[in-house]
Amino acid sequence: MSPRYPAPTLADLPDDIRAKVLEVQEKAGFVPNVFLAFARRPAEWRAFFAYHDALMDPESVGRSSSLTKGDREMIVTATSAANQCLYCVVAHGALLRIYEKKPLVADQVAVNWRKADIPPRQRAMLEFAMKVCNQSHELGDADFAPLHAHGFDDEDIWDIAAITAFFGLSNRMASFAGMLPNPEFYLMGRVPREKK
């Protein structure tokens, strides 16, 4: 983290945020830097992670979607690469490797998603996400047709756009704040996880 914006310690966090961070630590085995970096402003942390969870785990808010967890992480990885956000490419690339069960795909998507070993459905999804990321002002009805042809409905397309837009904010905050990926992310999904 940047010395200008030091992250608070676990002991300094409000009870609800500390409980969530400890829950993540228990599951992951470490505390992802984003959880502490954004906790310097508790109200914003709560809003950020509520929206994050609604987009990345829609079942948690009682909504269904045809986008898989791998699809969602693929959108984040590709658009974060376009935004040159080291933290999000590494962290979400790790999750992409795990959900897709393809150790190489996250690197392919981060470097050049057009040459990645992904099916046409995900290629169409990323084509749309990248247009939202880089040229949202040019979107029109014709951009929806390829997605519909691959079975995405309008709610799925909203998810693609919302994930892209949300992580555009996250990318910029992570880069601005000098947030670096935790070392643990680099190996996740590349080497077998040790049994506890």
Image (cartoon, helix red, strand yellow):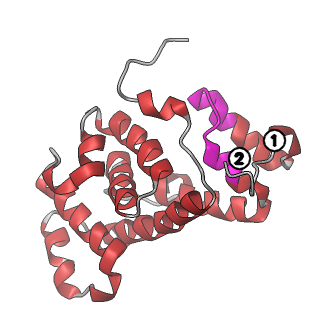
Predominant SS along the magenta part:
helix
At 65% from the left edge and 28% from the top edge, which residue is drawn?
26
Q: Position of residue 114 (x, y in %)?
A: 16, 57
Q: Position of residue 191 (x, y in %)?
A: 37, 20
Q: Earlier in the sequence, mark 1 or mark 2?
A: 1
User: Is 116 located above or below residue 5 in the figure?
Assistant: above
Residue at the limit of the structure toward the front, as seen here: 3
Q: Position of residue 8 (x, y in %)?
A: 80, 47
Q: For the residue marked with disc 1, what is the amino acid?
A: Thr
Viewer-closest of 109 and 58: 109
User: Is 180 located above or below residue 135 in the figure?
Assistant: above
Q: For the residue marked with disc 2, what is the amino acid?
A: Leu
Viewer-closest of 56 and 111: 111
Quadrant where the C terminus is found in the figure: top right
Magenta stretch: includes residue 24: yes
Residue at image mark 2: 36
Badge number at residue 9:
1
Which region of the structure is painted magenta?
23-37
